[in-house]
Image (spheres, grey):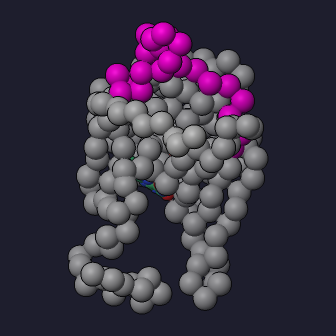
Amino acid sequence: MFYGTEENNHGHQYDPFKAVVAPRPIGWISSISASGVVNLAPYSFFNAMSDNPHYVVFGSSGRKDSITNIVETGEFVCNMATWELREQMNQSSAAVEAGVDEFELAGLEKADSVLVKPPRVAASPVGLECKYVKTVDLPGHDNAAGGYAIVVGQVIGVYIDDKFIEDGRVNTAAMQPIMRMGYSEYTVVKEAFRMRRPE
Ligand SMILES: Cc1cc2nc3c(=O)[nH]c(=O)nc-3n(C[C@H](O)[C@H](O)[C@H](O)COP(=O)(O)O)c2cc1C
């Protein structure tokens, strides 16, 4: 099949786009509002963009609580969503009032971050502590105002649970990160293979 995305006539119930840009890592973003309410939500339009400095991005469909908080208070944490935490991750995506702390909603413990104010998910093996860099508002079709914005953060601190570090390397597969595909599909990373770049 082929479809042009201006018309978006893919002929199916759902647009296949997200099913083919897959799997996508999930940035499980914790932030704090100016009034001190803690927030947690998953974002699968998420990735690392560079490693010197260390930049991450996530895409928000509209001005949700995470982006509002991050712009207001300038910090956030990207927690890793894992197989063990899949139900809590899903619960934290509920569309609730800004005053609701999704850690409490999902029954998750907080752990203090080292360099930023928002807490990390205590049970998650990874927490990327970020300072807010900028928001890029994306144009919609025909250059009209789009509903999407990309938040760029600089990772200033990296927490990794020591139990996943073996012989100086992170055993990512042992963390069992879950990744988003299309529709309501996910996958879980359980194994890795190695391939060296050509000389
Ligand atoms: C696995 C998963 C991935 C998601 N990815 C995104 C995303 O990339 N962008 C987005 O705007 N919403 C995404 N959502 C929906 C948000 O998590 C949801 O709207 C949430 O309520 C936003 O919370 P907030 O208002 O506290 O930021 C995703 C939901 C799930 C379950």
Query: Which residues make up the magenta segment?
Result: 153-175
Q: Is residue 136 above or below residue 57?
A: below
Asked if residue 131 can be seen in this view, the reply is no
- Kindly indicate the quadrant of the structure image that contains residue 174: top left
- Residue 31: in magenta span: no
Foreground residue among 32 and 194: 194
Foreground residue among 128 and 197: 197
Foreground residue among 56 and 108: 56
Where is residue 86? Give x, y as percent: 31, 35
Q: Residue at x 44, y 82 (%)?
A: 5
Where is residue 188? Give x, y as percent: 29, 37
Where is residue 20? Give x, y as percent: 35, 63
Q: Residue at x 36, y 50 (%)?
A: 23
Looking at the rendered structure, the number of numbered marks drawn on it comes to 0
Q: Is residue 146 above or below residue 26?
A: below
Q: Residue at x 74, y 38 (%)?
A: 53
Asked if residue 77 can be seen in this view, the reply is yes
Left or right: 153 as drawn, with respect to 29: right
Q: Residue at x 68, y 66 (%)?
A: 137
Left or right: 6 as drawn, with respect to 53: left
Where is residue 75? Give x, y as percent: 70, 37
- Residue 161: in magenta span: yes
Q: Quadrant of the N terminus?
A: bottom left
- Kindly indicate the quadrant of the structure image that contains residue 128: top right
Q: Quadrant of the C terminus?
A: top right
